[in-house]
Image (cartoon, helix red, strand yellow):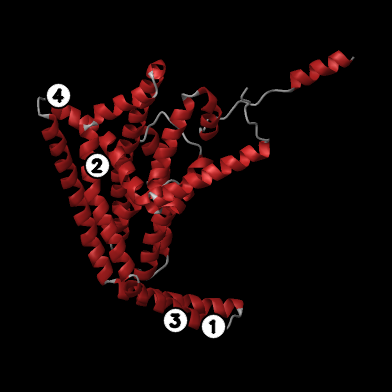
Amino acid sequence: MDTLLKFPRYAKVFIILIGFYVLIMMLSIAQDILVPLIFSVMIAVLLHPVVNFFVRIRINRVVAIILTLVLTFIITAALAALIFRQLGRFTESWPLLVDKFELLLTDTARWISRYFDLSRWKVNKWIIDAKEEMLSMSNAEVGQTLYALGNGIVTLLLIPVYVFLLLYYNKLLIEFIRRVFGNSNQNRISKIISETKTVIQRYLTGLVIEAIIVAILNITVLLVLGIEYAILLGIIGALLNVIPYIGGVIAVALPMAIALATKSTPMYAFYVLALYYIIQIIDNNIIVPLIVTSKVKINALFSIIVVFAGNALWGASGMFLSIPILAIVKLICDHIDSLKPWGFLLGDTMPSLINIEPILKKIKKNKV
């Protein structure tokens, strides 16, 4: 008679860790395949209601998908053209900005050497090295930039193809998922699929609207303060704001650095910091609760962890994809009994503390 092979607890933990390591390695190796595919799935889910709208007004489904993709391409191309135009101006002014940064660093070095009794020669050498590094940045990284640009172009060409096929074979893919899990789980699978689509659609739609509003607020603030490259910095700040917690810090650091380099007084950098802080308050307390609504709430601890993990695994793409993927994982955990504790751990619902005073009184009374 066959007997079940039992492993000690430490062996089970070791096997789980090995499996987790193999999974991470597979995700890293398959990055060039998975990242465009995941982006395509999210975009397809976002565009699915638009395709359905065109189908409802009696447009052929294939034509509806192509029309939706063309409209999306026009909007994206217009935004990209605006960013690249502003980026071209910024690139032309880069050497001038480096010189202004050098003057700022020189003045700062004088103040530091005067008040902290440091060697002036060492501080000046550090400034010279920093300037050479900033000037050589545009030349030394040309090869890497071209390589990354080539990969980006290939990805951009793949995504529309993936999105078209995902939208076209939408019903086939959903039916496949239902058949995989059998007839006994049809209601649960249908509910998970429906809620997953709702989460992705609400999250991405809200994110786009939030980015537009934050970009308008950023550009308005920078134009009022007279900061150069206001449009470019405002748009970049809005895009970085999509990354939870970390993006906002980088988004405010860029215009503060430009303000320090281009303005006669450092007070403008503090003005930028103060006004961006007000924008963050408006974003976190008004825009996000009203617009970026979602049934799935992730607590701040795991949000930060997955953002860093996504960056380590897939770079910038991983940072953008980390929160939606974690939201989907939590949604699945919430619908599977054995995984519900993990879904609870990922959520932001704080358990109520148990009042132990009546219990202690009862124990004391029994002793008496």
Tag nearer the camera, 1 or 2: 2
Residue nearest the observer in this picture, 332 or 221: 332
* Tag 4 residue: 56
The residue to which callout 3 is attached is 128
Residue 257, image x, y percentages:
39, 65
Q: Nearer the viewer, mark 1 or mark 4?
A: 4
Query: Dividing the image into 4 quarters, which one contains the N terminus?
Result: top right
Q: Which mark is residue 162?
A: 2
Number of numbered callouts drawn: 4
Which numbered disc flags the more N-terminal residue, 1 or 4? 4
The answer to whether the residues at label 1 and label 3 have Cβ atoms under 8 Å apart is no
Given the image, on which type of amino acid does mark 2 rest? Tyr
Q: CA distance from mark 2 to mark 4?
A: 23 Å
Vertical relation: 334 (above or below) 28 = above
The residue wearing badge 1 is 122
How many residues crowd around disc 1 within 10 Å: few (fewer than 14), some, or many (20 or more)? few
Q: Quadrant of residue 11?
A: top right
Give the Cα separation between the discs numbered 1 and 4: 71 Å
Left or right of 160 on screen, residue 29: right
SS for callout 4: helix
Q: Earlier in the sequence, mark 2 or mark 4?
A: 4
| Tag 4: amino acid | Arg
**For residue 265, side relative to residue 305 (left or right):** left
The first of marks 1 and 2 along the sequence is 1
CA separation in Å, label 1 and label 3: 10 Å
**Which mark lies nearer to you, 3 or 2?**
2
Closer to viewer: mark 4 or mark 3: 4
Q: SS at mark 3?
A: helix
